Amino acid sequence: MTQAHDCLLIIDFGSQVTQLIARRLRELSVYCEIHPYAKVDDALLDALAPRAVILSGGPASVTDKDSPRAPQRVFELGVPVLGICYGQQVMVEQLGGAVESGHHREFGRAFVEPVHGREDAHIFTGLFAAGREEVWMSHGDRVTALPAGFEVYGRSSGAPCAIIADPSRNFFAVQFHPEVHHTPNGRALLANFTRLAGFRGDWTMGAYREEAIAKIRAQVGDGKVICGLSGGVDSSVAAVLLHEAIGDQLTCVFVDHGLLRAGEAEEVVGMFRDHYNIPLIHADESERFLGALEGVSDPEEKRKTIGRLFIEVFDHHAREVGDAQFLAQGTLYPDVIESVSFAGGPSVTIKSHHNVGGLPEKMGLDLVEPLRELFKDEVRALGRELGLPAHFIGRHPFPGPGLAIRCPGEITRDKLAILRKADAIFIDQIRRHGLYEEIWQAFVAILPVRTVGVMGDGRSYDYACALRAVTSVDGMTADYYPFRHEFLSETANRIVGEVEGINRVTYDITSKPPGTIEWE
Ligand code: XMP
């Protein structure tokens, strides 16, 4: 791995929020990589040649036997190191200080004040304007003896060593989590740290675009590439980037499984084939998918059927391209980061995600993954850089299995048609009220129940539907969106009034967990 950019290495000890450290740094235009502590060896350190290192938090206690440590060489690289929470304790312990299991646990909000005389330290630039900073703590252990060279820079009521530093080596360690939203000025602390380490803020999507294009050209040469286009942001950005790099050596395959939203196929084909002139195979395979799904109501069976057919169909159409050697995928950095697991044991599959895993081996193709180093918000920034329309880049995520998982019970063409109409109205309402950007994802699910209603003077017996709208950062957790009553009643009136087949509208107010975003 050779780095075009200065790299900051994040050593992961298994904190739930390690990814947030990386995201905050990327927002500061600092390139960073997360690696699990057990994988950080001399070869990796040599290859990355990090300009600075951050030790993440983690669930272990350094007082436990066999608890994780950083390679000692990290402290001998001569580069700045920042320890966060468990990372602070690791640092103290490895450098000759002492940590005790806490008698005083501290969770949640706390206030840190600078030690007298330290207010002007570089690491504090822009901080403590109000005399103290709100921070988010989550620890049971605490530092009881500092390693040689360290001094206390900041304290809170529960953490006498909330911020410690050895300024001669640019080693810093904090007991709280600067990366989380609940530490409002944490970003300034991280910015000061990267500035002290000499980062130039050279990680921008403009620069990335040029490098990615050069890399794609070097990998692909004059070979042919196929790319599965779903209409989602990731595969779209990957396709436009690839097209810029290799032109007509790229062919996109868009599989229409008959489970798309109203107008979706036309929009995708119109944009890629007609606007960008990207060679595109539009495979209308709705009969095949809907036929195979007839009578299937079990959610996992639906997902598996769609996944299997998708691979078959994609494979078939991709072969039409002829001698393609490469398959492009919109894999993102969060899919690549190896996580540190302390729980042990196999994790439970909640839902079988639809992807084209297994395809490259089956087809004997090499993978091109030009977005592998990026977080979702960076992919959006790259999309803007590449000139993709704003409304396309800002689209809510749409799952691979499409409307199938928004139609609990058996899928029929009638139900899909009703669902499409109701969904289009809901999204139209959200856009009209200027709420689309605030909401992470919104859709309608058609429920497998018919209910009695009264329409005009007559009795109706039609489907009920559920509106779902959530706020989220990454889809891992989510909360329902708190619409105003007026919005909900206006939307329900429109759906019942305009969509034949629905006579009742409900609003799903479940968060994730315990619910999931999709209904299946
Ligand atoms: P859940 O329902 O698991 O969804 O809370 C979390 C996010 O993932 C999307 N999702 C999928 N995306 N293939 C995808 O590409 C899938 O099989 C799939 N299932 C769920 C979902 O829309 C939400 O954004």
Image: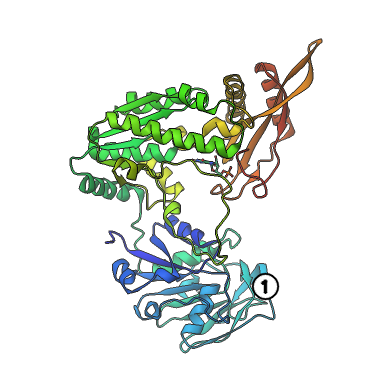
Helix, strand or loop for disc 1: strand
Q: In screen coordinates, is 497 left or right of 80?
A: right
Badge 1: how crowded within 10 Å, few (<14), some, or many (20+)? some
Examine the rendered structure and indicate whether residue 391 appears above or below residue 121.
Answer: above
Where is residue 218? Give x, y as percent.
21, 48
Where is residue 144? Give x, y as percent.
59, 86
Q: Residue at x 53, y 44 (%)?
A: 352
Where is residue 381? Give x, y as percent.
41, 44
Residue 425: image quadrant is top right
Camera-side residue: 58 or 366? 366
Q: Which residue is mark 1?
A: 106
On the question of residue 434 being in view, the answer is no
Examine the rendered structure and indicate whether residue 351 appears above or below residue 135.
Answer: above
Camera-side residue: 216 or 225? 225
Which quadrant of the render holds ligand 1?
Answer: top right
Q: Residue at x 27, y 47 (%)?
A: 210
Total number of numbered labels? 1
Q: Residue at x 38, y 65 (%)?
A: 8
Q: Please name the amino acid that badge 1 sits on.
A: Glu
Q: Identify the colour scheme used.
A: rainbow
Where is residue 315? Give x, y as percent.
35, 34
Examine the rendered structure and indicate whether residue 232 appears above or below residue 473.
Answer: above
On the question of residue 30 being in view, the answer is yes
Q: Residue furthest left?
A: 222
User: In which quadrant of the rendered image does the C terminus lie?
Assistant: top right
Q: Residue at x 38, y 35 (%)?
A: 388
Q: In screen coordinates, is 249 left or right of 65?
A: left
